Amino acid sequence: MPERIPLARPSWTNEMRQAAMDTLDSGRWVKGPQSRAFAEEFAAYCGVEFASPCNSGSGALIAALRLLGVGPGDEVIVPSLTFIATATSVSMTGATPVFAEVEGDYWCLDVEDVRQRVTPNTKAVIGVHLFGQCYTSELIELCQEKDIALIEDAAQAHGASIEVEGKVSMSGALGTVSCFSFFPSKNVAVGGEGGMITTAHSEIGARIKSIVDHGRDGSLQSQEVGTNMRMSEVFAAIGRKQLAKLDSWLEVRRTNALRLTKTLANHPTLHAPLIRPNSKHAWHQYCIQTDTAERFIDHMEKHDIAARLIYPTPCHQHPVYSGHHQHSMKFPVTERLSKQLVSIPVHHGLAEDEMIRIIEALQQYT
Ligand SMILES: Cc1ncc(COP(=O)(O)O)c(C=O)c1O
């Protein structure tokens, strides 16, 4: 019996194990050199000046909203086709998430729909680089035009990039404040829960470390409301080793994605994901669009290959938003995609024989 091929397989090497052990042996378990170095290296990777590790991607989003002063009475526009934390982070601050439609072709926020939903109460937009695909640079332009902060939810997009005004920018540098997750399935992980906040803006950068550390400044006085959202030194040490591998892992993900897309050319029922022009996809997920999702998932599972509907319930339809003014609103593109997008393995841990099994299973499906 061949082994089941999972949707994600966290990388764990001797080098990472050693880094974790060395950090534990050092006795410095929090607030030490590993977190500082991870922040510096991550900021450099994204091409920004400021970064702060934190306890999760959700924590990063809540911290980002607080850095921007978002709270009760404010509205924050979010896509409904995303992981629920994008929306609930807004609710956690007391502000209202305002759901918007996504693009039919690239599945990120639809800029024209966002434009319609801007009101005098709109304090920010959270754009998601869904599955590792960057949102359109037109979203950045719209937020600049309207003078609204743009929070970049890059939880799924470590190493993605897009050309903005003729210059290639990495994820982490595409918003007023940017947020990453190191959940074990993500392109970079830390051996537990973790996240990162980045920014190029010095006035926010000056507070980015303090917001995850009780709002304290160097003198240990609290200047603003914050709490303990720090990352442990062990996780930072592991994260540094993973970050050093990211570019080589992205190459593997991109090669795998290309092979899957070539396999799906002219397929009768399965449609490969598109890549936005002038951008580099980070392939956190490879989602196939199909009207036969249930039958396709069944087929892949029979071949011991993990496959699942990625977001079967759009955020606005979750029970948590049963009292939300948009709970029964129609979002035709989002609702259609929620029933059509099936994630299959694309990760950098796939062996050649596993890739061949996936390709053959796709070829056999009609
Ligand atoms: C788009 C998106 N936003 C936010 C998060 C939250 O990250 P975490 O699970 O680290 O809290 C995730 C993680 O799954 C995500 O995919």
Image (tube, helix red, strand yellow):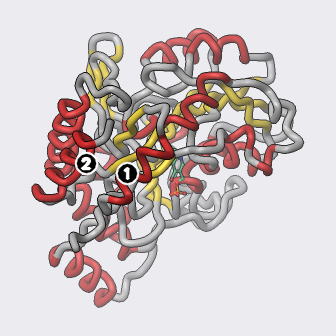
Say whether residue 231 is left or right of residue 151. left
Say whether residue 93 is left or right of residue 252. right
Q: Distance between the residues labelled 1 and 2?
A: 8 Å
Q: Which residue is drawn at 35% across and 37% down?
A: 48
The image position of residue 141, as x and y in percent, is: 50, 12
The image position of residue 91, as x and y in percent, is: 76, 46
In the displayed structure, 362 sits above or below 353; it is: above
Q: Residues within 10 Å of mark 1 (few under 14, many from 20)?
A: some
Q: Which residue is drawn at 20% across and 57% down?
A: 350
Q: Which residue is drawn at 67% across and 58% down?
A: 226
Of the 4 image quadrants, the one containing the C terminus is top left
The amino acid type found where label 2 is placed reads Ala
Say whether residue 217 is left or right of residue 71. left
Q: Which numbered marker is on residue 110?
A: none
Residue 101 location, quadrant: top right
Which residue is more in the foreground, 130 or 334?
334
The image position of residue 227, as x and y in percent, is: 66, 64
Mark 1 and mark 2 residues within 8 Å of each other at the beta carbon: yes
Q: Which numbered marker is on residue 299?
A: 1
- Judging by the rendered image, the residue that carries numbered circle 2 is 361
Q: Which of marks 1 and 2 is nearer the N terminus?
A: 1
Q: Can residue 172 be seen in this view?
A: yes
Q: What element carries label 1?
A: helix
The amino acid type found where label 1 is placed reads His
In the displayed structure, 77 sits above or below 312; it is: above
Asked whether mark 1 and ligand 1 are closer than 8 Å, the reply comes as no
The image position of residue 289, as x and y in percent, is: 43, 32
Q: How many labels does the image show?
A: 2
